[in-house]
Amino acid sequence: MIAFLKKYEGLWLFVHSPSAIVAAMVATLIILGAIFASWIALVNPYDLASFSLFDGLLPPVWQDGANPKYLLGTDDQGRDMISAILYGARLSLIIGLSALTIAAVIGVGLGLAAGYYGGRFDAVVMRIADVQLALPAILTALLIDGIARGILPAAIQQDLRVAVLTLAIALSLWVNFARTARATTFVQMNKEYVQAAIMMGQRPSRVMFVHILPNILGPLLVIMTVDLASAILLEATLSFLGIGLPADSPSLGTLIRIGMQFMLSGEWWILWIPTLFLIALVVSINILGDFLRDIFNPRLR
């Protein structure tokens, strides 16, 4: 068994990294809970008929006046906190992963092309990236969201909130992919296998996506892991500010915004339980990102 682990260095390092193991367990439990929320949750927070206002503001089971049915209590609407968090995590993960996919496609495509062609195209792409880097991601997302609100008809804005929010987050995160793909493409362009493919007359698209892209996936995978946490935080921040999802779509950010209304009234669990859940998710993903960075760059170990 030890010989097998040593053969695969990444697995060997993972087994000997307690922080990575704990982070992987926490992230896996949260993701599985979000995926199977329909089977695990006591109530469906999107279905008003599945919960009652009479069950509102019940504390967690370790406090007086609790209902053992609701382990972490209920919110002001009577929704089970665990159910709301699981469904909220599902929505946050869907938005985060969708935004990350769009950002990766845009950023990696532009980065590969900039590194391959260079010249004016590279200069234009990088200057756009520099301008966007001068703005915090949250301001970029707010700008894009505001433009979408001004363009889209009011009648369909509510139905497209998830799509608009996903696109706003994606366009805030593509720069990291573009810069990383460009830098690593410059390195690969000097390799003999790339020069040989070019001399054989292969199309630029084939050289970029068949020969170069598979050899730069390591750094891009690290960026994807770190930016997933950033995407989830962006969604939570926008929803907390009231710009993201509405109150009837309980993402983690929306739940925290609702909980803020009860911060000083004694119902602390409505705010702190979703907040701690979000912190656990983001921190675990960031720890896994740092672990992957160490694997792909041994000099950082």
Image (spheres, rainbow, N blue to C red):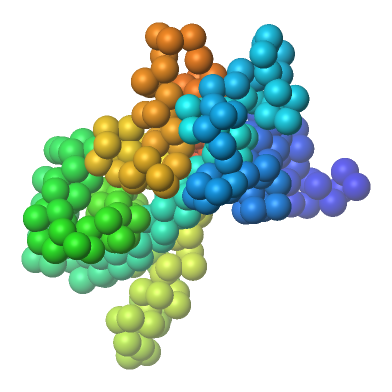
On the image, the x and y values in percent for residue 186 come to: 30, 60
On the image, the x and y values in percent for residue 284 come to: 57, 34
- The front one of 266 and 134 is 266
What residue is rendered at 40% in x and 45% in y?
A: 248
**As drawn, is 129 to the left or to the right of 92?**
left
Quarter-of-image position of residue 57: top right
**As drawn, is 58 to the left or to the right of 131?**
right
- The front one of 34 and 280 is 34
- Residue that sits furthest to the bottom in the current view: 201
Quarter-of-image position of residue 55: top right
Where is 106 relative to 218, above or below? below
On the image, the x and y values in percent for residue 258 come to: 39, 29
What residue is rendered at 59% in x and 46% in y?
A: 50
Where is 143 relative to 64, above or below? below
- Residue that sits furthest to the right in the current view: 1
What residue is rendered at 10% in x and 61% in y?
A: 151
**As drawn, is 205 to the left or to the right of 262?**
left
Answer yes or no: is residue 276 visible.
no
What residue is rendered at 60% in x and 34% in y?
A: 80
- The front one of 75 and 291 is 75
Quadrant where the C terminus lies? Answer: top right
On the image, the x and y values in percent for residue 297 come to: 51, 42
Answer yes or no: is residue 162 visible.
yes
